[in-house]
Amino acid sequence: MDARRFLKTVIGLVVLVGLLLLVLNWWGDYRAAQRASSSKRQIETTVTPSPQSSEGTATETPASPVESATKTVLVVQVPGLNFREEPSGTAKAYRGLKKGEKVVLLEQDGDWYKVEDVNGLVGYITANAAYTQKTQE
């Protein structure tokens, strides 16, 4: 009977370690998305000739969302909202959006919004109303 008890204990510990590794992996992905969203935003730069010299100077020109008369803007209500490549909970997350960050609503795809961020990157966020607030701009 002692061998059975020992075997059950070992199996239980293996299962616990496996669960711990899964949680730590998830936590690492979550923290990586947080770090990516807080790192510097990449801004496209263009080189234009300077009137004072023949050399070009770099000027920052952020990519802008598609312009229209009025556009629907979503304001993120929770920190770390996943901004994903595809409309799926298992799709790769570009980054976590910050609370208060604004994205332009392009279309709704079922339970997902197709949106464009301030850098012109197009992706998907959940259409759950608890996570965003719609405004017109």
Image (cartoon, rainbow, N blue to C red):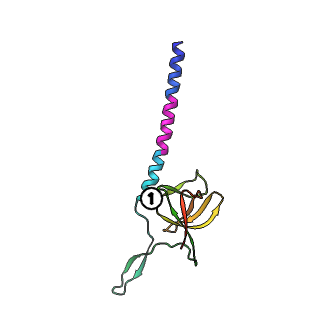
Q: Secondary structure at mark 1?
A: helix
Residue visible at 51% across and 34% down in the picture? 18
Spot occupied by residue 58 in the image (x, y as percentages of width and height): 39, 76
Magenta segment's dominant SS is helix
Query: What's under tag 1, amino acid-wise?
Result: Ser
Relative to 3, is 77 above or below? below
Return the residue nearer the eye: 96 or 137.
Answer: 137
Badge 1 density bin: few <14, some 14–19, many ≥20, Cα 10 Å: some
Q: Which residue reaches farthest top?
A: 1
Spot occupied by residue 2 in the image (x, y as percentages of width and height): 51, 13
Number of disc labels? 1
Q: Residue 24 colored magenta? A: yes
Spot occupied by residue 54 in the image (x, y as percentages of width and height): 36, 85
Return the residue nearer the eye: 87 or 72.
Answer: 72
Apparent side of residue 52 relative to residue 82 in the rendered image (left or right):
left
Residue visible at 33% across and 87% down in the picture? 52
Apparent side of residue 70 relative to residue 23 in the rendered image (left or right):
right
Residue visible at 52% across and 17% down in the picture? 5
> Bounds of the magenta span?
14-26
Apparent side of residue 68 relative to residue 80 in the rendered image (left or right):
right
Residue visible at 56% across and 76% down in the picture? 67
Q: Residue 27 colored magenta? A: no
Return the residue nearer the eye: 49 or 62.
Answer: 62
Residue under pointer 1: 37
Relative to 53, is 81 above or below? above
Image quarter of the N terminus: top right
